[in-house]
Every structure is written in structure tokens, then in C-alpha cells.
Image (tube, grey):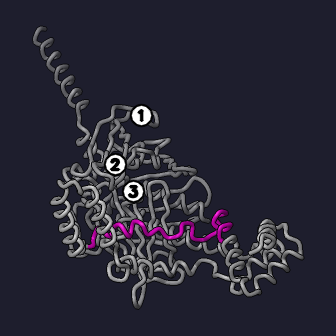
Amino acid sequence: MSDNIHQSLSHLMDNEADELELRRILKACDEQDGEYLADTWHRYHLVRSVLHQEFEQEQLVDIADRISVALEQEPEPAHRKKLFENWRQRAAQISDTWMAKGAIAASVAAAVVLLMPNPQQELPVAQQLASQSAGYQQTLPSRGLQQSPIGVQRVSAGAEVARAPYLLVDNQKLRQERLIRGYLMQHSEYVATNGTHGMMPIVRVSGYQAAGQ
Amino acid sequence: MIRKFISAIGLFGVLFISQAAKAADSADQWLQRFSEAMHNYEYSGVLVYSREGQLDAVELSHDVNDQGEQARLSYLDGLPREFLQEGDRITRKISGEVVTSDLIQGRNPSGRLSGGLEKIKQFYQLQLKGQGRVVGRPAVIVEIVPRDNQRLGYRLWLDKESALLLKSVTLDPLARALETFQFTSFSFTAKNEQAGVSSDEAPLSVAQNILPWLPEGFELFMQKQAVMVSEDHLANMYSWSDGVSTFSVFVEPLRADSLKEGHHQYGATVVVIRSIHEQNQGRVITVVGEIPLHTAQKIAAAF
């Protein structure tokens, strides 16, 4: 992508582009290597949305805790363990020779290569998680200009139209908050009749209710 | 004369000793008294609840009769909302109109500490933290300190006279305050009647394996099918308690308008939502409770 186009895109994102620059960008997107430009444009919007917290989904799914639990539950593959044992024995045998340093370095390198997991066989967990999170990736704006005309609209049609998608997001957010309140309410009613604090815990939810309504 | 003098000294001595014995009450005894008092006294007052960025004031009254505990909690600000407890039933009212009425099952005896004190001490340390003054009344400060990082701690100000709760601060595992309940006006009357709850319900053992991972010490005390979460949302609800802290897990089929994955924290209460995609139909797991966020996340992650 030429520097000129890049600069125009930058102007466009800052709402400073003139009609000519806009046309140039749209044209460049249609050209042969326009795919790259469209992708960049899409990414800029994505970054801006995240920075402005315009996403309905505040945190993109964090699967770290899930992976750690899955790893905890997964038994260590036996053959990998055996391999490690072999390597340790041999390392112990040669470690008293003058070549110890070199040999250990070599075997560490070998071990790293051997222990590198083979993604096709070794990581059912990772695969499973990846396929699970595919659902959330779909909620991100779709790639490419053709599917996502929002960017164009925002520039050319002014503020009124631009606000529409965010209104939609707000409504969804409100609906979700109302639903969360339902769960909190059920939980707090249980705590109020079974806990140590009497009815006090109910206040937790109702405060939330006031904020939502 | 001398006899009188001796008996006076004797009386004085007895008084003195009993006074000393009272002062030396342990944290255990205070908690025991507290958990009984909360269900057996008639009390009322204005309660203030605060957590980051929020303050609410409610009027709270509690009474006991032969139908069980009767309590009323009504909002002093904003929309006139009201909660009524009649035995095991909780009714919600907005502007005087009944919105919902839920029958809450699963009396949790260890939730009231009675009989469960030994078990609670396995997971919490009970400490006396001196004396204080709340709502113009002398109070004893008792702290419930978790022994691991899977539960929250509580600092309680108990009325010296009645052992009723005047103020409570919920603490995270690093002892930072998450929320505060405090009476700003308070009165009580002793009752002879005991709350009509004596059924010592044992923890449910049937569905213990619903959770692939469970923080130590928590036992399942309630399960309820098809709980109405909203007008058109049903979920199966399960509640666990370690005698002090409680969390609930809701399980339901995945829908287009289900909650999005993520977590939320409101004061001491966390909400962790996870959707599981299975071949035919997905499920949504929602963990709600007064437990540390990482614990709730681990519970949800283990599904």
C-alpha cells in the first residue's frame, strides 16, 4: 500500500478526509491488491471500537482459566514421561565427562524438539477450546468492506446514521443487564432465607435493579 | 451486720464473676448467639448498604410468629420497592403491587451457623477484634477470616446487648472491603417465641456431581428445576454453602438471547457466565455468589 493511500485512510479515520480521498480509498479497495487495504481499514475500526469500549462484549473471551483447569485434569502422556526419564538418565551418565556441557546442550535441544507437542495429536483440549470460541469470533464485525458497510456510512452519512448501531448495542446491553438481575435476584432470595444476615443480602440486588431501570 | 456484709460481698463477687465471664465470651459464643438472635428477635431499623459507587437506604423489620419468620425490606429512595418474607416465601412488590412470589426451599441449617460451627471453623478462623460503637450502641467486633483463598471474609459488629448484627463488612481474600451493611437506626425486642424452623435438613448428596470442580467445604443445599430467571427464561438452579458463603449455579440450554460469556462483579457478588457448545445443543452455565472471582471462574471453567 502506498504511503498516500495510507495517509488518506488515516484522515478518513479521523473524519478529516475530503471527498476525493474517500473516492480514492474506495477505488483502491476495488483494485487487485485492495484486499490488504480493506483489511487494514477493518482493523482500524476494530481497534477504535475496542478503545472506545463500544463492544457489547466487554472482554473478549478469556480462556486461560479454562485451559489451566483442562490441563490439570488431563493425565500426562505416558510416552512423553518415558522420554524425559530416558533423557535424564543419559544426561546423568555423561555429565561427569569433559563433554558434559556440550552433550547436555545437545540433548536439551533434542528434548525440546522431541517434546514439542504435535498439534494434531496432542492437543485435543486446545482444539476443543478453539472450536468453542469460534462462536464468539462471529460476533466481531465481519471482515472486508463488502460485508461491512458501516465504515463507509459513518463517513458519508454523518452523525445521525452513525449512532444507530450503537443504540442497538445499548439495547442489547440493557437486556443482558436485566437478565443478570434475574439471576442475582434468585440467588439473593435464597441467601436471604438461608444465610446468616437475614433479609439484608436482598439489598444487593435491588440496588442493581435501581441502576438498571 | 457482719453477716449482711459478707452476703453483700458474696453477691458483689458473683456479679463481678458473671460480668467477667460475659466479657471473656469467645468469638465462637458470640457467633452462636448472633446466628440465633437474627432469627428469634423482633428488630427493625434503617439499613444502609454501600459498595463502590453506590449507596442504598432501606427500612428493615423482622419478627417471628408461629408461621415462621416475617420480614419486610422496603426502599426509601427511588421506585417504592418492597420485599416481604413470610416463612419460606418471598414476595416482591413494586409500588404496592405484587410482582413475583417465590417459595424458597432448602433451609440451610449450617447457613445459620447452628450446629455447624465446628464445620465452619475448618474453613474460617473466628476472631474477636475488640469493641466498637454502631448506631450509638456498644458493639463487639467479630471477624470471620477464611483459611484459604476460595471464600470471602466478614467483619461483624454485633450488638453487645442482643448479639444482633449492627454492621457487616465483606472482605476479599486480601482483606479489602467489598461492601458494607450498616444500621443507622435500630431497635429490638426480645421474643420468647422461637422461629418455627427445626428441620435439620442434611445436605443433598444426590446431585453432588453436578459440579466437576467444587471449592473445598461447600455442600449442595438446594436444587430447583425450572426457576424463572426472567419472564421467558427458565434455568435449573443449584446452591452450595460452606455455612458462611453461598454460591448458586444456573444451568440452561443455550439460546440466541442468553447471556454473553464474561464476568461481572457487584460488590461482593460475582457473576460468571460460560456457554458450552455441544454437538446438538449448547448449555449456559451461570455462577452467581459471594465468592472470589477466581473461584467462580474455576467452577465455571471446570464444566
Residue positioned 84% across, 79% down in the render: A24
Q: Nearer the viewer, residue B241 or A92?
A: A92
Position of B170 with respect to A12 (left or right) is left
Q: Are marks 3 and 2 in contact (CB under 8 Å)?
A: no
The mark lying in front, picked from 2 and 1, is: 1
Position of B24 with respect to A124 (left or right) is left
Q: Residue furthest left?
A: B3
Residue positioned 62% across, 65% down in the render: A213
Would you say residue B235 is visible in this rendering?
A: no
Name the mark on residue B41: 2
Q: Gap between marks 2 and 1, in whole Å?
A: 17 Å
The mark lying in front, picked from 3 and 1, is: 3
- Tell me the SS state at disc 3: loop
On the image, which quarter does residue A68 sit in? bottom left
What amino acid does circle 2 point to? Tyr
| In the image, residue B53 above or below residue B246 | above
Q: Gap between marks 3 and 1, in whole Å?
A: 32 Å
Q: Percent x, y for residue A139?
A: 58, 79
What amino acid does circle 1 point to? Arg
Residue positioned 61% across, 75% down in the render: A172
Q: Quadrant of the N terminus of chain B?
A: top left
Q: Percent x, y for residue B270?
A: 44, 61
Marks 3 and 1 belong to one chain: yes
Q: Nearer the viewer, residue B248 or A77?
A: A77
Q: Which residues are magenta?
A: A46-74
Q: Which residue is mark 3?
A: B292
Marks 2 and 1 belong to one chain: yes
Parent chain of label 1: B
Position of B290 with respect to B17 (left or right) is right
Which sits earlier in the primary sequence, circle 3 or circle 2? 2
Label 1 neighbour load within 10 Å: few <14, some 14-19, many 20+: some
